[in-house]
Amino acid sequence: MYYNPKVRVTLGALVDTIIPYTPGLASRQGAIQAVGGLYSHVDEYLIWSLDHLFFNVPLASPTAELLNIASSQLIATGAAGGSFNPENFPFGSTFAALSQEDRLKAITLLERLQVNPGILPFLFHNNSTFTQIIADFLNRLTVFCYYSEWSGYGATPFQFEKRKLEDIPISWKQVRYPGRAYHYHALRGYLVDKFIE
Amino acid sequence: MSYDADVIIIGAGGGGAVVAKELGELGINVLVLEAGPWYGNKKWPNPNSESGDESSSDVKDLDKRLLDKQFTDYEADMNDSISGKFRWGPADRNKSPWFRSLAQIGLPWQSTGVGGTTQVYWSNSPRALPIAVDNVWPISYQELIPYYQKVEATLPVHPAPMTAKEELFFYGAKMAGYPLINTLNVTFPGYRPQPNAILPPDPRINDPHFPFGEKLTGCTLRGHCANGCHIGPSVEKVAKRSTLVSYIPLALKTGRVKIMPNTFATRIITENHPKEGIRVTGVQFRNTWSGEFGDLKSKAVVMAAGAIETPRLWLNSALPLNPWVGRGLTNHWFDVVSGIFDEQVLMNILGTPEVPPFIGQTSAARFDYPGLGSIENFGLSPGLYAMTHYALSQHGYSFLNQTDPKEPWDLYGREVGERLKYLMSQYRKSLSILILSDDEVNCQNGITLDPVLKDEHGPVPLIRYSPSKKDKEKRNQLARIAADFLRKVGAKNIIRADWPPGVFIHLHSTMRLGYVTDTNCEAYQVKRLFIADNSVLYNGIGGPNPTLTTQALATRTVEKMVQKYFS
Ligand SMILES: Cc1cc2nc3c(=O)[nH]c(=O)nc-3n(C[C@H](O)[C@H](O)[C@H](O)COP(=O)(O)OP(=O)(O)OC[C@H]3O[C@@H](n4cnc5c(N)ncnc54)[C@H](O)[C@@H]3O)c2cc1C
């Protein structure tokens, strides 16, 4: 999916923070645990969702901007702990230049309304509730998408009436979810056979 | 004057479908307008991509094979809040969902379509707690009992079967010192199986050679309640008794009920009658595919559009002012507390090393505490699981916050990164508990019209909810009880999500009986206009899941309405 690279890199960095590549976990619990959200293209899902959430007014770009403004503020106030190279912001994304922990701190600034709402982009401008709602939404959607079947739809995941589940999502393997089932031989009886009045 | 029907019902969800069946059985001609699609009906073979027919009134139109195809069991396909089949939006998934304004972070979780939000609901069908009704509501608990009984027999409701996750939950409740209760009328704290509107599994289900097949009736414990159940030999015998498969087929069988999906009611039409005063005469609607508007006339109208849209429709129709329209919203301010177990601990208690959340009815065990609220176990597919346990919190990222060492949870707030992935890797060894607080009615909470934002159906609803100090205490107490259950059975980690108050899964009391309507659920200010969804509940019924009570009240409302206008 083509999209403005700055937006893509910014939201990609978000996905990579919430569901990162985790070789450490893999070394303890098996190779499958390394894979993260970018491998499953959760960033594309996030962009699509942001662009279709609100009356067909695209929100992916202003949301990326929101994250970048919060990141600049984090840096400006000296609160960014991790190292970053100010010369080298990927496609100009401040958010993507931060460490994973600092990215979460930047989002927290937005959630706690510690970024001046007057400098935020269209729709978020002086609208702190909407800013908080979208910050919450980003986490929720990323996590839901990654652990759902979405990444298994192959090349056309947004053609809802045509798509077919082609692959087993990696996340299902990571959590050992067997997918859709028709029955389980799992009855353990009844604690009460009949309720009384 | 010629009428399009005796009664028009707005909304074919938890309440509206009950009204349709009950009226039809009394020989009243009914037209149901439903904003969303109709799954499992031959007249809409491709309900999300083609407009299909205008209406259906024949039970023979119901088609189980279509339902099998449309209810895919996949959680993003069914439950994605933007593009899922069970979203709040028009049938055409290429269009955006219908926007709701929120005054806070959160998520209104409602579904359009025939069956309404019962398509996704878990079928938990407890009665109200008597202490939340007696001497509180303008009608008594005793008065509700015959209607409860009728709905319980019709759905029908049964004690839920146990699988591993229920056994673990019950063991925790027992170890924490609470009794098992086997009553429908709960007056003291205790645990019991959920009264679920789910057809019981075949007793031979554990036989490895048992021939599961298309002809089988009953739940197969496959854990897809939330993603749309389609298990059963025919639409009307599907195991989970959403109104799509219970009351709607019964309504069609009366031969008196016609249902129009993809039809959004945009205005209640009234007249000033010399004798009756302001009274309803019909409904204006918009077809969600063609965008065309039309008017329909009837002798009475029942609003059953849910606790958000019913007040929105009242306000958008400029019906008489009533300070309680839209006000008094309760939502059981939910929370999630979960535990992770070592295999050995599970082996000792259950004889198996795992307690998979995806096996069994989604929620089959409960605990009620009159005065505080309810607690229930639940198990979800992994996307919904991760979202509800680790991504929904008012507390921010857990690693940026200290956990209070005096509290019984080890983790508190939102989880991300490696820790999230680790926690999810323990999915099959986790037990989830949902907290439903008995929150109080407050007239500041509720639905108003957004002063700026409009969609094709008028100003959108603005939802506002802020719990009281007492609500907060009750919820904390329930969360501690849940954590105690988990600790008592040896959970290795206990995690509290701390959901924001703006998560709306149960929504009630925005058009309260006694304030907006009389005790027959007829609007005080508009004659022949009745309300029969969660909005008319007087309060949050003490914490139990609300739908059965709405359905019982709707059954009663039909009786009163027919006595007054149709006998
Ligand atoms: C995940 C989940 C699990 C749940 N589990 C349980 C449970 O186990 N037990 C329980 O008791 N409750 C449960 N609930 C809540 C339950 O779904 C609701 O209590 C119930 O559906 C409410 O019925 P209702 O008639 O008020 O609204 P709904 O069922 O939402 O029905 C309203 C209907 O009206 C239609 N409509 C709205 N506006 C218009 C309009 N203007 N014109 C035409 N049609 C319109 C809607 O499309 C919808 O079909 C659950 C909810 C969720 C989200």
Image (spheres, coloured by chain):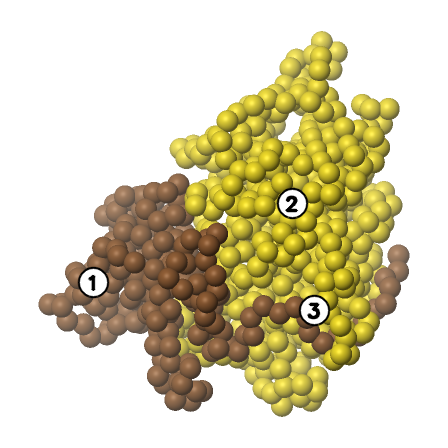
Residue that badge 1 annotates: A94
Q: CA distance from mark 1 to mark 3?
A: 49 Å
Secondary structure under tag 1 reads helix
The answer to whether A110 appears left or right of B360 in the picture is: left
The answer to whether A51 appears left or right of B556 in the picture is: left
Residue that badge 3 annotates: B221
Q: Amino acid at mark 3?
A: Leu
Chain letter for the brown colouring in the rendering: A
- Is the CB of the residue bearing disc 3 within 8 angstroms of ligand 1? no
Which residue is at the front of the view, B388 or B487? B388
User: Which residue is at a point 27% across and 51% down the rendered structure image?
Assistant: A61
Give the crowd class for mark 1: few <14, some 14-19, many >=20 residues within 10 Å.
Answer: many
Instruction: Output the chain of dot 2.
Output: B
User: Which residue is at a point 44% across and 34% down the rendered structure image?
Assistant: B455
Which residue is at the front of the view, A159 or B16? A159
Residue that badge 2 annotates: B41
**x, y percent for residue B121:** 64, 55
Chain letter for the yellow colouring in the rendering: B
**x, y percent for residue B189:** 76, 65
CB of mark 1 within 8 Å of CB of mark 3? Answer: no
CB of mark 3 within 8 Å of CB of mark 2? Answer: no
Circles 3 and 2 on the same subunit: yes
Q: CA distance from mark 2 to mark 1?
A: 51 Å
